[in-house]
Image: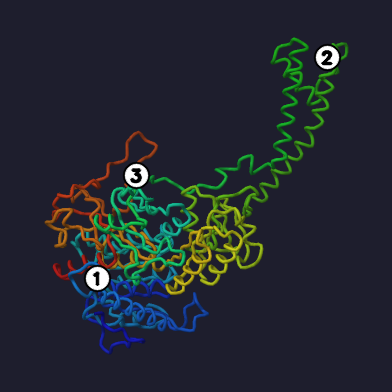
């Protein structure tokens, strides 16, 4: 049974004991992360929030503290129900037994005094997940000075800056702690982006088949949803079956399963008997493993540079083609009538077209007729050249402006919102060569320069106003991704788009789970033939941040309906559930599965499995072979020196890490 969480947890009078975790933030991600650490990993958590209401949801009457307390209360009730009905991992009992309620503090800035009051000098990890990169950097530098041994997890949108900051903070930790283990140093600072974490899953909702990509040591793992097999057919399990979709997936009034859906929820990491018994349920399978391309860049719609189709109009191109065809016909006629050589006939025809040849007095009648026709064709060149010059200047003048959706565009994705999340999703969609039309209300939004540079058609306007979605060619679109930061705007756009095109594929960004479930059921009931998905960025990103705070390397997170499956790299040493067991024995249905083993010697291993090994793609040398072995024999015995890639549920991974803490005490 989980401990009760009071509606408004009071700050304890004494400072927190050593080994707790601190979460600092100002939006939904901070609250979700605190829930993840408290109710999944059983950690002692101090949550630092700014006073007052959430700046991203000013219409909400609750303060930041009130919203956090309400979320904790709902999570406590849900986990109590789950605990009463029995867990899937079995064995260890309550994750949160004996763990005190989340300690909530309020402060406008994470200053030195505030961090000291939160106990940063005795904390095991600190997450800085403010929406402002500068505030996160300033707090990270302060925290590293106050506690050099502190594990830092920092949220940054700027990826290049994040790489430099990670190296700087790791160097500071190495100077303060000479002789530190390189593995511990590598985990001392982790820079993550919620936009990068959630973008692949959001982009996948626009694709048929809902593929999700996980990257490990330059290899791409593709997890794909597959519909239930028809009578007489056998489902292809791929490399392995990762999940069974909920039993209500094919029910128009059904809801996407979550952690509180009971028996109707999707089953993560089922065993073979569960897969065989699950008739009429879709699956998520590990479908393929392929090598990643380190130089794969987002393509521009319409190709590189400025092709003729973008510089000159279609009417002008057809006119130029007509003049060229007339000139070619005159050359052929000159060859047939004058019996001259091809080069000389072409030369004379060009002189006639340009009005530079002498009159053909005394020449045969055929030659004179060809000269007259050439002069008439030459008269068409002057307006044609003038039109070409004017259109070229017009193209140069509008090169810096946004491209409008072309008339014949179809089969594209309409993307609403070019903030942090929308910009990353746009890049992801263009990497997959999917045509996109963007709708953004703010002409100075973060992603507008990127859309301009990629020549992505963009409509500037309020999506709730009539005619804006029509300008984005919504009637011929394949999908709508509503990714603005306002739930009601996303819902209004989805409802209007469905009224225009009932079978449109729709994915909405929604924060509140109960609201998302109600929206999902209503849209599924009203439009049973269309696919509807609702996704929360904080829900997708929080598990990755939580695993990083536990000092483990997260390779990716795959949403399965409203659940999340994690892919992580673990050292076998210190995990009794893995060490000394065969791959088959180490598999725990509903908790974790070993997917691959890193066969590289420990001294030569890449610290970050998610990184792509550098190599020259233009050279003759082949990319270095991966040390990961995916075709595992069920009888292989896992050794303490092995490093494995596992797929795990949130609670399954929490059990692995909790057991390790009981074996290896916290330093």
| Residue contact at pointers 3 and 1, CB within 8 angstroms | no
Q: CA distance from mark 3 to mark 2?
A: 67 Å
Mark 1: secondary structure:
loop
Residue that mark 2 sits on: 366
Residue that mark 3 sits on: 291
**Which comes before the other along the chain, label 2 or label 1?**
1
Farthest residue in the bottom direction? 13
Mark 2: secondary structure:
helix
Looking at the image, residue 462 lies above or below residue 639: below
Residue that mark 1 sits on: 87
Q: Position of residue 322 (x, y in %)?
A: 73, 31
Task: Judge from the rendering whether residue 599 lies leftward or rightward of residue 439; answer left or right.
Answer: left
Label 2: how many Cα within 10 Å (few below 14, some 14–19, many 20+): few
Mark 3: secondary structure:
strand
What residue is at 55 percent from the left and 65 percent from the top? 494
**Viewer-side label of 2, 1:** 1
Q: Quadrant of residue 106?
A: bottom left
Looking at the image, residue 573 lies above or below residue 399: below
Residue 667 seen in the current view: no
Label 3: how many Cα within 10 Å (few below 14, some 14–19, many 20+): some
Task: Judge from the rendering whether residue 120 lies leftward or rightward of residue 52; answer left or right.
Answer: left
Which residue is at the front of the view, 437 or 512?
512
Looking at the image, residue 240 lies above or below residue 547: above
């Amino acid at each position: 049974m989980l401990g009760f969480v009071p509606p408004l947890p009071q700050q304890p009078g004494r400072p927190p004991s050593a080994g707790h975790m601190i979460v600092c933030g100002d939006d939904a991600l901070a609250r979700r992360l605190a829930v993840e650490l408290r109710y999944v990993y059983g950690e002692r958590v101090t949550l630092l929030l700014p006073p007052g209401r959430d700046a991203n949801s000013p219409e909400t009457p609750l303060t930041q503290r009130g919203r956090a307390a309400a979320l904790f209360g709902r999570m406590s009730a849900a986990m109590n129900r789950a605990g009463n009905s029995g867990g899937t991992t079995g064995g260890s009992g309550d994750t949160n037994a004996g763990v005190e309620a989340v300690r909530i503090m309020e402060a406008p800035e994470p200053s030195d005094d505030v961090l000291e009051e939160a106990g940063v000098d005795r904390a095991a990890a600190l997450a800085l997940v403010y929406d402002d990169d500068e505030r996160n950097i300033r707090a990270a530098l302060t925290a590293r000075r106050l506690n050099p041994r502190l594990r830092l997890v920092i949220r940054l949108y700027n990826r290049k800056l994040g790489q430099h900051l990670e190296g700087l903070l790791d160097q500071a930790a190495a100077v303060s702690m000479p002789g530190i283990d390189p593995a511990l140093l590598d985990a001392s600072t982790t820079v993550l982006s919620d936009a990068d974490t959630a973008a692949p899953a959001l982009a996948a909702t626009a694709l048929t088949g809902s593929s999700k990509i996980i990257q490990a040591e330059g290899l791409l793992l593709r997890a794909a949803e597959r519909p239930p097999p028809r009578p007489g057919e056998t489902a292809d399990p791929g490399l392995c079956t990762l999940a069974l979709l909920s039993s209500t997936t094919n029910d128009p009034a059904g809801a996407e399963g979550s952690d509180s859906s009971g028996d109707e929820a999707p089953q993560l990491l089922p065993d073979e008997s569960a897969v065989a018994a699950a008739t009429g349920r879709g699956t998520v399978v590990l479908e393929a493993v392929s090598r990643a391309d380190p130089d794969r860049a987002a393509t521009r719609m319409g190709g590189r540079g400025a092709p003729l189709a973008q510089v000159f109009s279609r009417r002008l191109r057809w006119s130029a083609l007509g003049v060229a065809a007339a000139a070619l016909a005159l050359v052929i006629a000159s060859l047939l009538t004058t019996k001259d050589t091809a080069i000389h006939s072409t030369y004379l025809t060009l002189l006639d077209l340009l009005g530079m040849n002498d009159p053909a007095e005394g020449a045969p009648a055929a030659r004179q007729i060809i000269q007259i026709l050439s002069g008439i064709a030459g008269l068409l060149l002057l307006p044609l050249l003038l039109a070409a010059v004017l259109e070229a200047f017009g193209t140069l003048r509008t090169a810096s402006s946004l491209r409008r959706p072309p008339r014949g565009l179809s089969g594209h994705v309409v993307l609403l919102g070019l903030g942090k999340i929308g910009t990353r999703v746009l890049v992801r969609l263009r990497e997959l060569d999917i045509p996109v039309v963007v709708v953004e209300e703010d002409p100075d939004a973060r992603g507008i320069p990127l859309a301009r540079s990629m020549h992505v058609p963009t409509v500037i306007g309020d999506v709730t106003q009539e005619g804006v979605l029509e300008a984005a060619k919504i009637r011929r679109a394949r999908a709508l991704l509503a990714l603005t930061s306002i739930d009601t705007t996303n819902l209004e756009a989805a409802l209007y788009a469905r009224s225009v095109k009932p079978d449109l594929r729709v994915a909405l960004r929604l924060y509140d789970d109960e609201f998302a479930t109600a929206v999902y059921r209503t849209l599924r009931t009203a439009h049973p033939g269309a696919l509807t998905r609702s996704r929360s960025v904080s829900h997708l990103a929080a598990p990755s941040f939580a695993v990083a705070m536990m000092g483990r390397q997260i390779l990716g997170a795959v949403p399965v309906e409203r659940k999340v499956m994690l892919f992580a790299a673990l050292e076998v040493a210190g995990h009794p559930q893995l060490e000394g067991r065969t791959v088959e024995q180490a598999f725990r249905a509903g908790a974790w599965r070993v997917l691959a083993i890193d066969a590289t010697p420990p001294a030569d291993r890449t610290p970050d499995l998610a990184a792509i090994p550098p190599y020259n793609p233009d050279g003759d040398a082949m990319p270095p072979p991966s040390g990961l072995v995916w075709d595992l024999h069920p009888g292989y015995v896992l050794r303490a020196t092995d490093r494995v890639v596992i797929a795990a549920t949130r609670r399954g991974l929490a059990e692995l890490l909790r057991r390790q803490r009981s074996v290896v005490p916290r330093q």
